[in-house]
Amino acid sequence: MSGATDAFVRFENVQKSYDGETLVVKDLNVDIPEGEFLTMLGPSGSGKTTSLMMLAGFEPATHGEIYLDGESINNVPPNKRGIGMVFQNYALFPHMTVAENLAFPLKVRKTGAAEIEEKVQRALDMVELGSFGGRRPAQLSGGQQQRVAVARALVFDPRLILMDEPLGALDKQLREQMQYEIKHIHENLGVTVVYVTHDQAEALTMSDRIAVFEDGIIQQLSTPDALYERPENSFVAQFIGENNKLSGTVREVKGKTCTVELDGGGTVKALAVNVEGVGSRTTLSLRPERVEIAPAKGAVQNQLTGEIRELIYLGDHIRTRMAVSGNEDFIVKVPNSAGNVPLAEGAKVKVGWEAGDCRALDPLAV
Amino acid sequence: MTDTSAASLPGGSPMAESLSPTVDAPLTTVDGTPLREALHKAERQKRWRAFLLVVPLLLFVLITFVTPIAKLLQQSIYNDDFSSNMPNLSQWFVENPDSFGVPQDEAAFEALVLDLQTARENRTQGQIGTRVNYDLSGSRSLFTKSARRAARIEAPYREAILDLDKRWGEDDLWGVMRRASSAYSSSFYLKSLDLAQTPDGEIYQVDKKQQIYVDLFWRTVWMSALITGLCLLLAFPIAHMLATLPLRYSNLLMIMVLLPFWTSLLVRTTSWIALLQSQGVLNDLFVSLGLIGTEGVLTGMLDSLGMADREGRIPLMYNQAGTIIAMTHILLPFMVLPLYSVMKTIPPTYMRAARSLGATQFTAFNKIYFPQTVPGIGAGALLVFILAMGYYITPALVGGAKGTLISNIIAEAMLNWYNWSLAAALGALLLAGVLVLYWLYDRIVGIDNMKLG
């Protein structure tokens, strides 16, 4: 086995166990090209942070190899890996000023005093904290601390930056602002970023590619739009964005489409993405914004009748919860545009969608 | 009020200008009382209630802490055993301030005889003698003997007294009596510092052989410092383990650290005696391992270092080693607990962050972890050091002659020499020393930087 590929970071059959009985990471294989912003997304306990810690060198891999720039780094201690890291709670050294925090990685590298000063100032300017060098971390707001942490991870010009849920402690507005700032820094510097989060909106906003983790396995590794538009299994469909699911049994497979008989009554056509064949169980995945209310007859391939349970007015659209084919939580987003049929709770309406918008995936246990 | 505010709204600038000088005037409430006064009144009840809650503790501290210390300080410079029981001679000393040494004046001896006769009647000759004995040993018997015969002494008194005992003709005695004739004196402090006074009041250092207190103070300081250092060396890794181990194990370890706290101090000290004495567990163990004893491998080496007794065993007790070993063990929890409480608040991510930024394990510890534990080190060191400075039982039991500390001599002064004033002076010096150290600590480390828990 060799890491001689163009991948900058490469996980090869990496497995990790803490107790020798269960695997936290099961056979991880990822190639990350240089300059990419890759996000590891998943619920807590899915193995994403463990994978990051193995890359950073804080946890040894139980099995497999990790390559950085073509070299195996399994036996390289964290301080020799040259990887910048931003921690969940920033981990700014409280007994040092901001400038001393930034100078720390340079000092341990025995950089000259003049160069340290120049680099620290440049890094502070980059995160727009040019005049804050003399302050202590405790005197900064959460957002400012976050920026210092980013600046510190970048100041020694690492080619790879790891971020472990760096925005988790910030409020929503600041979080969104920081997402853009981090993204811009990534674009300007061209460094490779591996980012860990459990927040799918964050992942969709920032990433070039997203690896969705669950149960120690990458469920899908795709660009944000592919992940949302073309989820390959029910977990991803469920985890990324809002999703309507309908359970049924495959009755016919014809090319890329299949016919599914729903448990709650009715038969629909769907894309056969992840089905085992005729007679197998499947869960259909359907995005709420792709469902049409009261479609003209024959305009879409699938039509069912639903009963409106709840209407929530959200300004630009009306969120409609319906009971469709036994699913009591079938969500439809109805655009708030002129000429729409007035909706009322308890009313029975037709809903419809194209077969191409409905993906037949692996069955979810209901 | 409503009128003005209503008028000022549409009126605008002229009204605003006329009002502006009043901005600096004190604010008032709606009915015109000054705001400050109103606030004071409104919160008075609350303050009183808070104060009443504190009163019992305040009284307790006052009675049990401030008063004894004040009394101690007073006693260290005040002793009227002589002056109040020898009023006539004391009066003579006041009237003749320039007479040093044995007086030629018959009046002085008349006063002395008169006072000795009164003392005999009041049975205070022992008390007087003891007071003089503090500064001039052997004097007690002189006073009891002279008082016994005072009734029969007749004029001329000077001759009669000098006949009675020739010690009355010593300059030193009269110098000491002159100083004792004033209830307030610095002689106890001088004695505490191994100093003495000539009959004409000049201060000099006592003979090398009689110097005990200054050496003892220094021994107390350096042994306390050594014990503090040893405690720090032992406690730092334990505290670190306690702070980083999983809860399950750290609880067990914590119990083991606290176990000595739940055992009587006396039991712990005596168990050290069992361990350390020359026929004790440790020595027996070394002997059975063939390291020491009459045929031990290391006996020759230890002997040449003067570290072995006649049987080739190491004397670990009744010397400084015993005091240091036992006190380090007993004071260890006082170092572990503050360190632990500080280390507990240092997240492990700091070390990881330092490592990811390129620091070696050592640099990360040295530059990131260690500086953050300084408040705990400061608190623990101060606590252990101050406790060690005043420690009594352990050095008394395992210290022997060479391993005792200043507190043991204080107890000796009180219990065996009945010299409370000397004990008070020694105690006051110890207190002053600790306060100076505390002040130094504040200057160097900063007291705000201390975390006790």
Image (cartoon, rainbow, N blue to C red):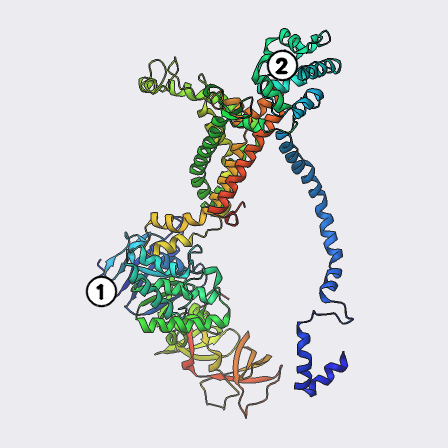
The secondary element bearing badge 1 is classed as loop
At a point 67% along the width and 76% down the height, the residue shown is B21
Judge whether residue B333 can be spotted in this image.
no
Kind of residue indicated by mark 2: Arg
At a point 42% along the width and 54% down the height, the residue shown is B349
Label 2, label 1: how far apart the Cα atoms are? 101 Å
Kindly give the residue lying farthest to the right in the view shown.
Answer: B31
Viewer-proximal residue among A366 and B190: B190
Q: Looking at the picture, do discs 2 and 1 lie on one chain?
A: no
Q: According to the image, label 1 marks what residue? A: A5
- Residue B433 in the image: state x and y as whole percent: 52, 36
**Chain for disc number 2:** B
The secondary element bearing badge 2 is classed as helix
Closer to the camera: disc 2 or disc 1? 2
The relative height of residue A357 versus residue A342 in the rendered view (above or below) is above
* Label drawn at residue B140: 2
Image quarter of residue A32 = bottom left
At a point 42% along the width and 69% down the height, the residue shown is A236
Viewer-proximal residue among A267 and B358: B358
Q: Residues within 10 Å of mark 2 (few under 14, many from 20)?
A: some
Judge whether residue A159 can be spotted in this image.
yes
